[in-house]
Image: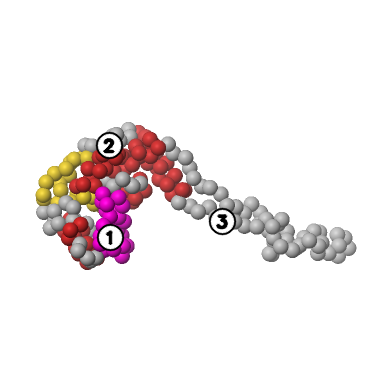
Amino acid sequence: MVNVVIKNWDGEEAGNATLELKVAKPEVAKSLVHRVVVSHLAGARQGTASAKTRAEVRGGGRKPWRQKGTGRARAGSIRSPLWRGGGVIFGPKPRDYDLKVNRKEKRLALRTALDSQAENLIVVENFAEQFAKPKTKELNAAFTRWGVEKDEKVLLILTEIPENIYLSGRNIETLKIVRADSLNVYDVIVADRVVATAEALAKIQEVYGD
């Protein structure tokens, strides 16, 4: 169980919250999270790299010179992989990089990752009403009041992403905003700070608490 202090817009203590998640056993936690992260990154690869083989390169239908009597090495095509402009031996071809991980394993890895970030978790009151219009400077100032250091990578978790908050945060290079029901292990573990609203924390407990 994780016990955290809820902070208001000014960074002052405004209550307490808890997060209770079933996590993986210590002896398998690291390997489980690693496998899910590798699967996530592999799934993000396009897999569109392609090189032409000697059969696909244009030209080379005629034998460059006769087999014997020239003093040069035997050659059957100018598109041999040994020639400049020829085909590629064992070059990349379009492929699917997806690695299968069971749904239950993914959820267990996510709960484990969230639990491992307990020390870096900051819970705040809903602050959507503070942004009547987009204001990046105000959002940066709020993070500072909540205890986020400069240049720290921040994962901001909300139940819904209001347009003004999205527009305020899109130019912050170290910030990523996600919905509480759309988390992934990679985003959680690469963040230096995880900032969540109290409503988002409750949503996490509801969606991932099994």
Residue at figure coordinates x 46%, y 48% from the top left: 43
Q: Do the residues under discs 3 and 1 have CB atoms within 8 angstroms?
A: no
Q: Is residue 73 visible?
A: no
Question: Counting other residues with Cα less than 10 Å from the Cα at mark 1, is it few (<14), some (14-19), or many (20 or more)?
Answer: few
Q: CA distance from mark 2 to mark 1?
A: 28 Å
Per the image, the residue denoted by label 1 is 163
Give residue 87's position: percent from left, percent from top.
68, 58
Q: Is residue 27 visible?
A: yes
Looking at the rendered image, the disc whose residue lies closer to the viewer, 2 or 1, is 1
For residue 24, side relative to residue 100 (left or right): left
User: Which of these two is toward me, 112 or 161?
Assistant: 161
SS for dot 2: loop
Residue type, label 2: Gly
Query: What range of the chain is rendered magenta?
Result: 155-179
Circle nearer the N terminus (2, 1): 1
Label placed on residue 209 = 2
Per the image, the residue denoted by label 3 is 49
Q: CA distance from mark 3 to mark 2?
A: 40 Å
User: Which of these two is toward me, 7 or 34?
Assistant: 7
SS for dot 3: loop
